[in-house]
Image: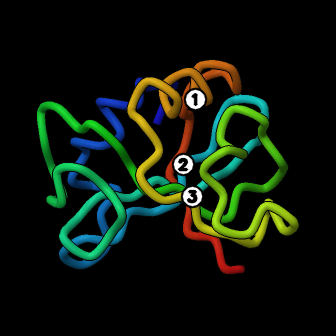
Amino acid sequence: MSGITLQEFMNDKDVVMGDYQRAHAKCADGFTVSIQASRWHYSEPRQTFSDKFESLELGYPTERDELIMPYAQSPESPTQTVYPYVPWDVVEKMVEKHGNIVAAVVRYK
């Protein structure tokens, strides 16, 4: 996978494991984060694929990122928490800041 946009990642059926869980997104600078959307995740709409997501669930980034800190469930543990309903434009800025998505990886906490 060469550098792709957030929208391309969210609509890539090859990064979905099972019915709804995506592999983690790895960016060009090495930053990795779970980016999820489905009926089981904190996202709008609550579906796996969409032409227009309003918000996404993020989780377990490899490092603290100030863009998403206002959404952290446990701000004292920024790499060990979930970030519910992060607005699309915030996620897009975060992905672009880290050089866009270059790989989908299975990562265990």
- Depth check, front residue: 3 or 91: 91
Q: Name the colouring of the figure.
A: rainbow
Task: Name the mark on residue 25.
Answer: 2
Mark earlier in primary sequence (1, 2): 2
- Depth check, front residue: 84 or 7: 84
On the image, which quarter does residue 108 sit in?
bottom right
**Label 1 packing within 10 angstroms: few (<14), some (14-19), many (20+):** many
Query: Which residue lies at the image location 22% right of the left edge and 42% below the top edge?
Result: 11
Residue 3 spot, x, y in % from top left? 51, 24
Residue 104 spot, x, y in % from top left? 50, 52
Residue placed under numbered mark 3 in the picture: 83
Mark earlier in primary sequence (3, 2): 2
**Label 2 packing within 10 angstroms: few (<14), some (14-19), many (20+):** many
Q: Which mark's residue is nearer the viewer, 3 or 2? A: 3
On the image, which quarter does residue 68 sit in?
top right
Residue placed under numbered mark 1 in the picture: 95
